[in-house]
Structures are given as structure tokens and as C-alpha cells.
Image (cartoon, rainbow, N blue to C red):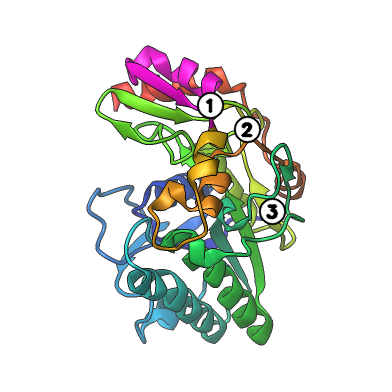
């Protein structure tokens, strides 16, 4: 298949920029959308168009006109439930309706593996694993990503749009080598909760490749993860050359599990579903995405970490 016209929402975000870069390298024409303006500049040329504005704008269908597909990355990482409801759930529903009006036949969602429940210690999370049964005890981000999938699936079924949901792992790469799967940190000190099991990582280049590859692959719902998933100790050993963290205080996850409960008013890691989803030892399976999307093999984790540390230092 030749060059396509692709619209990428949230194109100014970390993942959005990666998707845009991959699309342009593949020779596609891109419409790069940002709610708040393109502050970092970018590539210029006849195959790149920059647009901005709200996703619930009445002009959205016109912006999407002529696009072969929409890659939906726009959202938020933090905020209140009300902010997530608007920026993630309602805006996603509006985007799907605008795509239908514009005649767009394919939408690819940058989803999240946070939608899964933790299961049992030592288990493996696959696409067949149950979604979180107690979203009220998780964070606003997880609740919004669950509702986002549901509303976009409903709109896709109503309009006959092919929807692919890529549940991305914890994104990491140059300048972003941290996630919520390690434990609380203060200055140079990290309280590392647990050590065993795999950290569900998705390196930024893999995220960009997967999102653009999904445009021409059969529609699917898959977990997009790195080929080589480290445990927490292995991750921190590879990160140690950066000089951070200087002090690691290990805490067994079972200790906090004894203190945790099911009261939604408790702080994050003292709510059992949050603690278990982030810190409990378990495995993650991303093989379906590799097969469905034709993803290129990655280097082993330590080589990826070394390359990302160098690129981040030179940025």
C-alpha cells in the first residue's frame, strides 16, 4: 500500500511525536493535531499539516476529511475525574462521531495496559485477561481509559468504523526513564516495592511503530510491549549508570499488601487494586501485537537502555 493521509491527535505529546516521526519516515502525509498548539515546532513540507483546537469542535469533521485513518493519542496523564471525563472519554466519543461524518474508515487508539485487573501473583497478563473489576479503587487515569475503550467501541460499531486498540505498556525512552511500577521516590532515594515479575514497558520507538503499523493491519486489540521485559532490579541496574537513584530501599510488596485495603479514600498504593496492578510480581505477553502488526525485533533491554540514556544526554 502506498502513502496515506493520516491524522494524529495529540501529536505534540511524547507518544504523538513518535507516531508522527514514524509516519513521516514511512512516507505518509500527516495532519498533526494538538489541542493547545504546536509549541515545539516540527517538520515543514507539503506532506505535513499542523492544526489545533478542541476535539469536540464542530470543525473536527472538516479537519479529518480525506484522511485514510486517525491515530488517536490525545488525552491526559493526570487530573481530576471530571477533567479525564472531558479530555479522554467525551473527546474520544466526539472524535469517533466526526470520523464517521468525514468518512474515515479506520481509527487506531493509543490505549493502556492499565485497564487490566492484577489477577493472581505469578500470573501472566494477556489480551484474554479480565479488565479491572474495581475501577472505583484505581486512579482517574485507569477509569478514563476503561471508559474510553467502551465508548469508542460503541461508536465504532454504530458507524461501521474499523477500530484497533493498542494497549501500550509503560512508555519509556530518552528523557522519560521512569514509571509508576517501581515505587515512590524522593530526591535521590527510591523505595523499591517488589523485585520479581516483569515491568510492562513499551519503548517509545516501538509505540510509534505499532501505532502507524496498525493503520494497514487488520483491526485488533493487542498489548504493545517490549520483547525483553526486565524485572525491577534489572531495570534499576541498567539505569544506575545515570547516577540515579543513589539510594534504594527495598520493600516487599506483601508488606504493603497487608496494610492495603479496599477503601477508595486511602492513598494510591494503600488501595489493594492499585498496589497489585503496579507492584505484584506477574508476567506480560505482547506476542499478539508483534504478529498482528509485523513489529520489528528489538534489541535486548540493556542495549535499549544504554541507547536511550545516550540520546537523552545529547538532546
Which mark lies nearer to you, 3 or 2?
2
Which mark lies nearer to you, 3 or 1?
1
Q: Secondary structure at mark 3?
A: strand
Q: CA distance from mark 3 to mark 2?
A: 18 Å
Mark 3 or mark 2, which has the lower sequence index?
2
- What residue is shown with label 2? 198
Q: Which residue lies at the image location 54% right of the left edge and 42% below the top edge?
A: 258
- What residue is shown with label 3? 222
Q: CA distance from mark 2 to mark 1?
A: 7 Å
Query: Image quadrant for the C terminus?
Result: top left
Asked whether the residues under the numbered discs 3 and 1 touch, taking CB atoms below 8 Å apart as contact, a structural biologist would say: no
* The magenta segment: 232-252
Q: Which residue lies at the image location 40% right of the left edge and 22% below the top edge?
A: 249
Q: Which mark is residue 201?
A: none
Mark 2 or mark 1, which has the lower sequence index?
2
The stretch drawn in magenta includes residue 241: yes
The image shows residue 252 at horizontal and vertical percentages of 53, 29
Q: Quadrant of residue 79?
A: bottom left
Nearest the eye: 111 or 95: 111
Q: Badge 1 local density, few (<14 within 10 Å), some, or many (20+)?
A: many
Asked whether the residues under the numbered discs 2 and 1 touch, taking CB atoms below 8 Å apart as contact, a structural biologist would say: no
Nearest the eye: 184 or 260: 260
The stretch drawn in magenta includes residue 162: no
Q: Which residue is the extreme one toward the front?
A: 258
Q: CA distance from mark 3 to mark 1?
A: 24 Å
Q: Which mark is residue 232?
A: 1
Q: Which residue lies at the image location 63% right of the left edge and 75% below the top edge?
A: 153
Q: Secondary structure at mark 1?
A: helix
Residue 82 seen in the current view = yes
Amino acid at each position: 500500500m502506498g502513502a496515506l493521509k493520516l491524522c494524529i491527535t495529540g501529536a505534540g505529546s511524547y507518544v504523538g511525536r513518535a507516531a508522527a516521526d514514524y509516519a513521516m519516515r514511512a512516507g505518509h502525509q500527516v495532519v498533526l493535531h494538538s489541542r493547545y498548539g504546536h509549541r515545539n515546532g516540527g517538520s515543514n513540507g507539503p506532506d505535513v499539516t499542523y492544526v489545533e483546537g478542541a476535539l469536540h469542535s464542530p470543525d473536527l469533521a472538516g479537519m479529518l476529511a480525506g484522511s485514510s485513518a486517525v491515530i488517536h493519542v490525545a488525552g491526559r496523564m493526570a487530573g481530576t475525574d471530571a477533567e479525564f471525563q472531558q479530555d479522554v472519554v467525551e473527546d474520544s466519543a466526539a472524535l469517533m462521531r466526526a470520523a464517521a461524518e468525514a468518512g474515515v474508515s479506520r481509527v487506531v487508539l493509543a490505549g493502556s495496559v492499565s485497564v487490566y485487573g492484577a489477577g493472581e501473583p505469578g500470573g501472566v497478563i494477556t489480551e484474554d485477561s479480565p479488565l479491572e473489576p474495581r475501577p472505583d479503587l484505581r486512579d482517574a487515569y485507569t477509569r478514563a481509559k476503561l471508559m474510553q475503550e467502551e465508548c469508542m467501541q460503541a461508536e465504532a460499531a454504530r458507524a461501521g468504523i474499523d477500530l484497533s486498540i493498542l494497549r501500550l505498556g509503560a512508555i519509556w525512552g530518552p528523557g522519560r526513564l521512569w514509571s509508576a511500577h517501581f515505587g515512590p521516590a524522593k530526591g535521590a532515594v527510591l523505595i523499591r516495592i517488589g523485585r520479581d515479575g516483569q515491568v510492562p514497558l513499551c519503548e517509545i520507538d516501538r509505540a510509534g511503530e505499532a501505532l502507524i503499523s496498525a493503520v494497514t493491519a487488520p483491526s485488533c486489540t493487542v498489548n504493545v510491549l517490549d520483547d525483553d521485559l526486565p524485572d525491577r532490579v534489572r531495570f534499576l541496574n541498567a539505569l544506575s549508570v545515570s547516577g540515579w537513584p543513589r539510594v534504594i530501599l527495598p520493600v516487599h510488596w506483601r508488606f504493603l499488601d497487608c496494610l492495603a485495603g479496599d477503601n477508595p479514600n486511602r492513598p494510591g498504593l494503600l488501595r489493594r487494586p492499585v498496589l497489585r496492578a503496579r507492584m505484584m510480581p506477574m508476567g506480560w505477553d505482547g506476542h499478539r501485537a508483534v504478529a498482528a502488526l509485523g513489529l520489528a525485533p528489538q534489541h535486548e533491554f540493556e542495549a535499549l537502555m544504554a541507547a536511550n540514556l545516550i540520546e537523552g544526554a545529547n538532546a
